[in-house]
Amino acid sequence: MRPNTQGRSRPAFTLIELLVVVAIIALLISILLPSLARARELSKRSVCAANLKGMGTGLYTYANENADDMPRANSTQVATSGVGVVNYVAKIGTKRGQLANPMIGETGTNDAAVSTVRNLWTMIRLNISSPKSFICPSSSDQPNDEENPQNYWDFGKGDVTGTATAAQAKEGWNQCSYGYQVPYGDRGRPRTDCDQRMAIAADKGPFGAVLDGQVGTDPGKPNLTTTDSPDKWSPWNSPNHGGSGAGEGQVVLYADAHAQFEPKPTVGVAYDNIYTQWGTQNGTLTDRVQGNKPTSTEIPWGQTDSLIYP
């Protein structure tokens, strides 16, 4: 016969035991959350690298049909090597075109008011790449959602025939997470036959937001060497992965079309700082690592000078 268990009650958890269980769960969560956040960021970096890898494929696709030149908007020719006349600062969305007359956004040989990312928009306009592929998932940027991107010539919002308003420029800034090698000079132009170690695109640099009138921190000219740690270099990294002034690094697209995450902006040929123009004095190269932060007139100083903007 089975013993009669009716009427018996199971011993319940005491309050102390319940509090201990809750404390253990809270401790485990506090330990796991940073790991989960880290894993999420590493996953986003992989997506970012895939975006830039895809951008590289698009750039080569374009170059194969354009005499090995990667996208380069028409602009005024430079008068002096290393000093340009193209105002690529605060010009995202300028003359981006009209729905009724998209050609109004095209630049001519005497037009200096063009942005650097205008060249990346070329791949959207020609249906080589999609607007989503220009968004780093670690940033707060949002892709352009206009139905007919082929009617425009740059990132931004709506029809622009003159100078973009501040709101339109900000809209354009937030639609592209990446910078492009400044192509407007007579040196360092992005081509399939350039030095394959050069950086030709990357996450936005640390100077762009400040120069384009957005919210950001100007880190000033770096005063570090290649042997300094990534932590010391963080103010000069892209803000996409860690925030303005505290970037953990950037994904860099090289001329050979491979992309990888770099903890410092000094990569490529002779540890070139990809976000600055080579430092010079009296026409002589003095520094590649620190360099000069970009302004509205600076273009690559040498054939292997990577100058990613914004």
Image: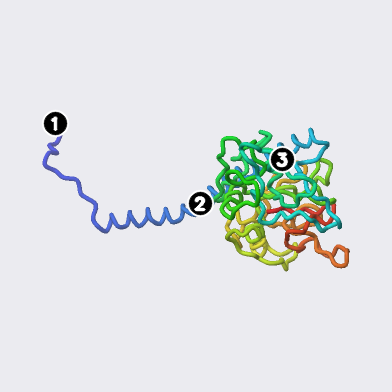
In the displayed structure image, the side of residue 194 where residue 207 appears, left or right? left
Say which of 293 and 224 sits in front.
293
Mark 1 vs mark 2, CA separation in Å:
58 Å
Q: Which mark is residue 37?
A: 2
Mark found first going from the N terminus, 2 or 3: 2
Q: Examine the image and state in which quarter residue 196 appears.
A: top right
Residue holding disc 3: 56
Mark 1 residue element: loop
Mark 2 residue element: helix
Q: What amino acid is at disc 3?
A: Gly
Q: What amino acid is at disc 2?
A: Ala
Mark found first going from the N terminus, 1 or 3: 1
Mark found first going from the N terminus, 1 or 2: 1
In the displayed structure image, the side of residue 224 where residue 26 appears, left or right? left
Residue holding disc 1: 1
Residue extending farthest top: 1
Point out the image quarter for the C terminus: bottom right
